[in-house]
Image: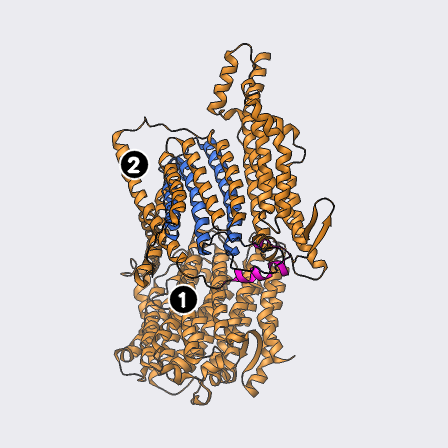
Amino acid sequence: MAKDTSLILMIFLPFIGSAMAAFFPSNARNAEAWLAGAVTVCGLVLASMCYPAIVAEGPVRAQIEWLPTLGLNFTLRMDGFAWLFAMLVSGIGFLVVLYARYYMSPEDPIPRFYAFFLAFMGAMLGIVLSGNLILLVVFWELTSIFSFLLIGYWYHNANARDGARMALTVTGIGGLCLLAGVLLIGHIVGSYDLDVVLASGDLIRSSDLYLPALILFLLGALTKSAQFPFHFWLPNAMAAPTPVSAYLHSATMVKAGVFLMARFWPVLAGTYEWFWIVGFAGMASLLLGAYFAIFQRDIKGLLAYSTISHLGLITLLLSLGSPLGLIAAIFHMTNHATFKASLFMAAGIIDHETGTRDMQRLGGLFRFMPFTATLAMVASAAMAGVPLLNGFLSKEMFFAEAIETHADSILDRVAPYVAVLASAFAVTYSIRFIHGVFFGKLPDDLPREPHEPPFLMRFPIQLLVLTCLVVGIVPGLTIGPFLHTAVTSVLGLATPEYSLAIWHGVTLPLLMSFLALLGGALLYLLLKNYLAHCEEGPPYFRQLKGQRIFERVMVAVSWRGARFLENRLGTRRLQPQLRLLVAVALIAAAWPLYHMSFGLAAFSWNLDDAVFSGLWAIGIFCAVGAAYQAKFHRLVALIFLGGAGLVTCTTFVWFSAPDLAVTQLLVEIVTTVLILLGLRWLPKRSEEFQTDAIRMAARLRRYRDLAIAVAAGGGMTLVAYAVMTRAAPPTIADYFLEKAYTEGGGRNVVNVILVDFRGFDTFGEITVLGIVALTVFSLFRRFRPAPDSVESPEQQRVQNATDEARPDRTAGETVSDYLLIPAVIMQWLFPVIIVLAAYLFFRGHDLPGGGFAAGVAMAAAFILQYLAAGTRWVEDRLRVLPLNWIGFGLLLAALVGMGSWLFGYPFLTSHSQYVELPLIGSIPVASAILFDLGVFSLVLGATVLMLIAFAHQSVRRLRASRIAAAEEETA
Amino acid sequence: METVLSVLVGLFFAVGIYLMLSKHVIRILLGIAIFGNAVNLLIFTVGRIVREVPPIIPHGFDVPPGPVANPLPQALILTAIVISFSFFAFLLVLAYRAYQEIGTDDTDGMRVAEPEGESLPPLGY
């Protein structure tokens, strides 16, 4: 198989497996395990197949073009270092799958676990194999998300939810910082390709942007690797199922941070800044993690802090900037992955078999599970750095580096002491784990009777512990060549001589190792009794929890801060919100004007304007009158409103917009009728019920509103004037004017724009209109209240009362024959208006008119019938329901549009020609006229539907009262 | 005439905004109606104003022989008129139904979703 294919397969197989795993039945434990196992083994095989090529030819690359113009490609790249990590990720992944098969209980939703697990593995392989920085960050964030999902796997557990959220918050923010850092690096180098970036170390280190890029980059790496001061999320992530911890928190997720630092070590390391930031974080994590680990009661808590400490060790090694330090760091990454994964699995077995992980409750388990105990002991010995185990080798390399001087500073001078102290702590907590769990008195209150786990559950631990032993005894024959490949792929020609032997003679590092072992054992003896009864957490530091600080910050940001802002800016009342909106718009508009000046022409006025001024004075009077009367005299306000509308309409006529005038006039009529229909149902207000204090406050508020409104209006005046006094720039309107007749086949340019050039907009608009009509209809029809819960409007009650008071009348008679003569005229007008609508419709393409105007005009005809004959009369005679008109209109418009597809033109292309009709003469027939027919039909349907839905309300009430009356009579 | 027209536009805006800042739904509705007119007129002014030259191509010509009014804002306003009509109708029905359900047209009293004295959102942590 080609090398690039196997690289791409390595990335995609886990994601494909994840998608498949999600669809298995929830009890398919075995099938899921087989699938996940197969995927991990495939990863292992594919990676192994690439190894010879990497040794022989260097990095293997695969590239898929993604956004080549931006220099972004889906580039995969595997060198020796990436290979080592890919093997770790796949290999430990396989063992964890095997382990999880026995660990997860049948009640757990297994498909979710394996789906997330495989997706996480894919993302992790993505980080390791990315050959492009942006791609790397994408996978980086993916691991954060999937680790969130895995940690929160038991989401019914509050600790799991909190831990998952904290992990996501910390690592997610880190990931964003990393993205910013990577963008800066890409900006410095001019490329996001990993090979290019790795080759331009000097350029990056000498750049002005080096420090910000470094800090952002390290924020990403240190949060991911749970390094001080971001370490607190890792212990809280221990609420995850143990297989997740064994995988994420030993070999993969937390290793991503140190992997990244090692990956970019040749580019970023070696400076004073790098040494201080990375070195301080590493040293603090090393020491504090080890110290905190001693005092944990939870086995997994102990392992989590130990992980922080060991990652701190790796970070510290990386900070030194010496090639030997890097070698030791990479070596310790693999060693830590093996022993820590096995220890997590052992912790899971203990939890599984006894029902608790509290070391103060556990004890004497050696008798019940000798195999597991032996394996755990060997693994802990590796963690403590006991000779003949792999942990010893890398730790000795660490000691050797610690005593060297790298950059003369306080940090460098204390390093050997810190190293020995932290190693002693590591010995102490390792002994505590072994002694506290497997030896001593057997407690009598264990939740379950302990026993050995099934062989296959123990098998992964056996394999890992065996690795620890073999690597520890014969390092040169086992890990040696692979480590060498990994190291040379990072360091290249700068790779120094190094030796993996166990015995270097009696050296200072060896002495330090023994000092640590001895000191650690002594410390355990001193602390033994205290540890058996102490509270959770280390003395003195117990109160100072990173978790609590994090929560304080989160509460401050997400709740207190939000509430503060809500109290200050937010309100549950509408007026302040609107006021704020208007005020902000006002300021946003005034600001640039104030700074860049308006360039207003002088205000001019001549006698010509007198007529206009008179007209507009009426408009202004109407508008102000409407506002003034709106409070108590709504009918008057409505009349003024109509006046303002008419002034607008006249303005349109005067300034060459006959289409607008026609439509505005018709719409004005329909609107007024609608308001009249609605107004009688809405409550009336009168002036009596107000005390002076309230009236004063209200008056002040309204003065403020008035000031805002006047300011906004003044601003709009300036805007309108500034626009009108400038010469018009050439716009697309010229194109429309030129092509309206030659291509659109119509002389009325506005109409041609609507039905032809911008037909699609119109189509969307009539759709909106239809939706609004249906909403209105459903508000009245579907979600209406019971008829008897609705009061009749006052006017109707008065009419009915009159009818009831007079013995010669029946209820409803007053309404039946009012306005007799106008009613007859209005009924006769019906056909006349139909003709007018038809006239408006047909001339629309050439002269003012069109589908909109015709539709509204036609609706006015129906309104007149309502006025003349009453709701029920019209409803009884309405043959074609407005709902059908709406449907027909929309369908017709769509079909006309699609018709042009038949001729190979885009949607809504129109065709035009003139047709001779007898009596009427030559009329333009464009396919656009059919479209306009759709518009007409929809506008008519929508308008009439809204009107009758509203008008029907009074009939319902009447009918309901009549039914109630009839029931009373029969009773 | 530009001066007076722009004053008219500004006044329509002022009246619309003043009414919309009111507490009562009916006044807000009237405000929206005037505001709609104001916006339409403003868009109209953007196309500049010219008298008695509607954008209609006379018979015998393929393109307008002289300068005509700008058809683009007109087309925009035509759709805007219809849309604002439907918007207004929807609001009116909404106000009516809200009054039916809640029994008030005072926006301060419309507190079905956020009752008066309701506790603040729950703590996150």
- Does residue A351 appear to the left or right of B3 in the view shown? right
Q: Which residues are magenta?
A: A730-749
Q: Which chain is orange?
A: A
Question: What chain does badge 2 belong to?
Answer: A
State the residue position of label 2. A698
Compared with A192, B73 (above or below) is above
Which image quarter holds the C terminus of chain A?
A: top right
- Amino acid type at mark 1: Gly
**Quick check: can you spot residue A954?**
yes
- Amino acid type at mark 2: Ala
User: Residue A319's x, y, as percent?
Assistant: 36, 78
State which quadrant residue A66 falls in: bottom right
**Front-most of residues A251 and A466:** A251
User: Residue B3's x, y, as percent?
Assistant: 36, 52
Q: Which chain is blue?
A: B
Disc number for residue A174 = 1
Q: Which residue is drawn at the image coordinates 67% and 49% (left, top)?
A: A930
Q: What SS does tag 1 mark?
A: helix
- Does residue A288 appear to the left or right of A224 in the view shown? left
Compared with A296, A684 (above or below) is above
Compared with B116, A364 (above or below) is below
Q: Is the stretch drawn in magenta largely helix, strand or loop?
A: helix
Which mark sits nearer the N-terminus, 1 or 2?
Answer: 1
| Outermost top residue | A807
**Front-most of residues A255 and A764:** A764
Q: What SS does tag 2 mark?
A: helix
Q: Which residue is drawn at the image coordinates 65% and 32% (left, top)?
A: A878
User: Residue A229's x, y, as percent?
Assistant: 34, 66
- Does residue A142 appear to the left or right of A627 in the view shown? right
